Amino acid sequence: MSEPVWQRGDLLGVAELSAAEILHVLDTAESFVEVAARPIKKVPTLRGKTVVNLFFEPSTRTSSSFEIAEKRLSADNINFSTSGSSLSKGETLLDTARNLEAMAPDIVVIRHAHPRVPHALAERLDSAGVINAGDGAHEHPTQALLDAFTIRRRKGRVEGLKVAIVGDVAHSRVVRSNVLCLTKLGADVTVAGPRTMMPEEPEALGARVAYSLEEAIEGADVAMMLRVQLERQARASFPSEREYFDFFGLTAERLRGAADDALVMHPGPMNRGIEIASDVADGPWSVILEQVANGVAVRMAVLYLLAGVRGGADGTAP
Ligand code: NCD
């Protein structure tokens, strides 16, 4: 018998995933999509499992997406967010990890402002799986997986597509995970942004680099816009919101340079009128809300696969 494709007990980044593993997550997610259309949106897959959601950074979309995914899989879940918990009282990560371990969770979902905190937690926690829900400007693997899933559902493939990822590249974990994921699947990826919002060595991302929106989206099948990360000192990187929009905001006019059936994507939350015009965000090209819906199915798939490796998921696929 051949080895199972998925053998990981943690999901820390796209960097370590092979194309076969990525495709396995996407294929698994397909079977979870229809759960959302059922009158009773619940399968017993993670019954009796405990999932802890640890959000050290604000989050609405990602934390609620994980929470819904966990509930639809029948897991018991609890949420710690920074405000109102000991996470904001200076407890060290090591102490948090020890205390968590004492509660015997099966999976811990963590978002943190510093890169590689999920990796450090995974090293500490032997008995629980760790999912990185965003670590600083480093990785956001489930976002990239749901983006690839959304593209594949719409276009039937990822391989050979031209994808432009535009905006605050320097501060974005979404771009890092997406470049890794989409190039592993054979897409042709270009990143673009103002020079002040590009990393020191943008080529190191592993994508083509452009410095204008027009150049990046020329003939593109997908235009993925990045949020200007105002909380990560991005404000100092451009003179005014107006000027940013004038050069890097996606408008219907600029979108004409892309392929006729181009998809418009954004991980949310959007700054309307800064990186994207409202009519484009709400327009026929936009799959932004599909990304949100697909996020639940993809996170269900990841939770299911991790729990399967960790042992004891009752194995009932939907
Ligand atoms: C992204 C994040 O937090 O990295 N959002 C998300 O997960 N929905 C993108 C962002 O905040 O710009």
Image: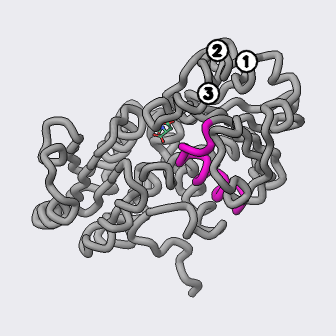
Which residue is located at x 75 percent, y 37 percent? 222
Q: Quadrant of the N terminus?
A: bottom right
**Foreground mark, 3 or 1?**
3
Q: Which residue is mark 2?
A: 242
Tag 3–tag 2 contact (CB < 8 Å): no
Please rate how many residues cluster around mark 2, counting C-alpha atoms within 10 Å: few if below 14, some from 14 to 19, many from 20.
some
Q: Which residue is mark 1?
A: 246
Cα–Cα gap, marks 2 and 1: 6 Å
Q: Nearer the viewer, residue 189 or 35?
A: 189
Cα–Cα gap, marks 3 and 2: 10 Å
Q: Please tell me whether mark 3 sits on a helix, a strand or a loop.
A: loop
Tag 2–tag 1 contact (CB < 8 Å): yes
Residue 140 on image: x %, y %: 49, 51
Left or right: 302 as drawn, with respect to 3: left
Left or right: 303 as drawn, with respect to 99: right
Q: Is residue 170 magenta?
A: yes
**Is residue 304 positioned above or below 218 on the image?**
below
Q: Amino acid at mark 3?
A: Phe
Q: Which residues are magenta?
A: 168-184
Cα–Cα gap, marks 3 and 1: 12 Å
Residue 188 on image: x %, y %: 81, 52
Which residue is located at x 79 percent, y 55 percent? 159
Left or right: 166 as drawn, with respect to 231: right
Q: Amino acid at mark 1?
A: Asp
Residue 280 on image: x %, y %: 69, 18
Q: Which residue is mark 3?
A: 238
